[in-house]
Image: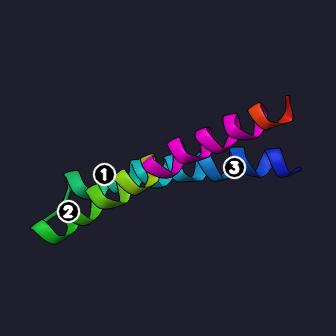
Amino acid sequence: MKAFSYWINSILAGIMAFVGLLASSRAADDAFAIGGLIVFLGCVLFIFASIGRYFDRMGSAH
């Protein structure tokens, strides 16, 4: 079940990244545009960190 939660977290982060890009593209002012990009970048960094943690865990198991 723990491995399944990593998938769920990454999928939710991907959805949040997409929403951040939508908010940034349709922003009426600079605050929402920058905020959307920050949300997008944060989610992408989270996904890459999650992938890194997965492979680190796989390497330590061998």
Which residue is drawn at the image coordinates 69% and 49% (left, top)?
A: 8
Which residue is drawn at the image coordinates 60% and 39% (left, top)?
A: 51
> What kind of residue is marked 2?
Ile
| Mark 2 secondary-structure assignment | helix
Q: Residue 35: x percent and y percent?
A: 26, 66
Whether the residues at callouts 3 and 1 have beta carbons within 8 Å, the answer is no
Q: Residue 58: x percent and y percent?
A: 77, 33
| Mark 1 secondary-structure assignment | helix
| Disc on the earlier residue, 3 or 2 | 3
Principal secondary structure, stretch drawn in magenta: helix
Mark identifier at residue 2 = none
| Disc on the earlier residue, 3 or 1 | 3
Q: Which residues are magenta?
A: 45-58
The Cα atoms of the two marked residues, 2 and 1, are separated by 12 Å
Identify the residue under disc 2: 34
In the rendered view, would you say 52 is above or below 36? above
Tell me, yes or no, whether the highlighted magenta stretch contains residue 46. yes
Give the residue at the far left of this rendering. Answer: 29
| Mark 3 secondary-structure assignment | helix
Q: Residue 1: x percent and y percent?
A: 89, 50
Identify the residue under disc 3: 8
The Cα atoms of the two marked residues, 3 and 1, are separated by 21 Å
Which residue is drawn at the image coordinates 68% and 34% (left, top)?
A: 55
Whether the residues at callouts 3 and 2 have beta carbons within 8 Å, the answer is no
